[in-house]
Each structure stands twice: as structure tokens, then as C-alpha cells.
Image (cartoon, grey):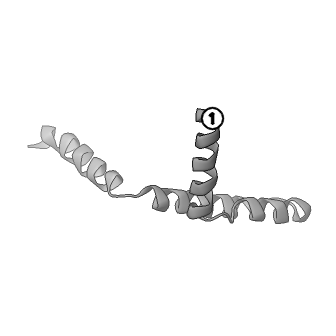
């Protein structure tokens, strides 16, 4: 039984990770980015926070627009 435990844990982790949507992953990365902004100096913080405040929908529109231009 104990030799199957790592396999069972690996499968459980895979299921949990696959349950995350792209938007959830993006939001989590943005949260981490905003946290990092507060560790920087004041002059850099405003620009950093602006860059990390883009919503997933805005990001997706820009990404899709960029993919459309790349295909032309």
C-alpha cells in the first residue's frame, strides 16, 4: 500500500491542478506580481501596480489581438 501512496498523491495533485482555470491562474500570478510591487521603491511602485492591474479579460483581448496580427 505504501508504495502506491506517491502515485495516489501524484494523481490527486494532477486532478487539483487541472481544476484551475486559466483566469484563476492569471489572477494568482497577478496577486503575486502586486505583492512584489510593494517590495520595490516608491517611484517604481506606481508603474508596477499599473502593469499588474490588468484584468484577465483585458489580457485575453490583447493576446488574441496579437495572435490575429501574427497570423496575417
The residue positioned 86% from the left and 59% from the top of the image is 44
Residue marked by disc 1:
70
**Quarter of image, res 42:** bottom right
Which quarter of the rendering shows the N terminus? Answer: top left
Can residue 10 be seen?
yes
- Crowding near the residue tagged with mark 1, few <14, some 14–19, many ≥20 C-alpha atoms within 10 Å: few
Residue nearest the viewer, comparing 25 with 58:
58
| Residue positioned 76% across, 64% down in the render | 50
Question: How many callouts does the rendering have?
Answer: 1
Which percent across, then down, holds residue 28?
Answer: 53, 61
Which element is circle 1 on? helix
The extreme right residue here reads 43
Q: Is residue 48 left or right of residue 69?
A: right
Q: Position of residue 47 (x, y in %)?
A: 83, 61
- Relative placement, left or right, of 53 versus 10 is right
In the rendered structure, the answer to whether residue 9 lies left or right of residue 67 reads: left
Q: Give the residue drawn at x 32%, y 52%.
A: 18
Q: Is residue 39 visible?
A: no
Asked which quadrant contains residue 56, the reply is bottom right
- Residue toward you, 43 or 57: 57
Look at the image and tell me in which quarter the C terminus lies. top right
Amino acid at each position: 500500500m505504501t508504495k502506491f501512496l506517491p502515485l495516489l498523491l501524484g494523481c490527486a495533485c494532477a486532478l487539483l491542478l487541472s481544476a484551475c482555470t486559466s483566469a484563476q491562474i492569471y489572477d494568482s500570478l497577478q496577486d503575486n506580481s502586486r505583492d512584489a510591487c510593494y517590495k520595490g521603491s516608491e517611484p517604481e511602485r506606481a508603474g508596477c501596480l499599473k502593469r499588474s492591474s490588468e484584468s484577465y479579460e483585458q489580457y485575453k483581448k490583447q493576446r488574441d489581438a496579437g495572435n490575429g496580427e501574427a497570423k496575417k
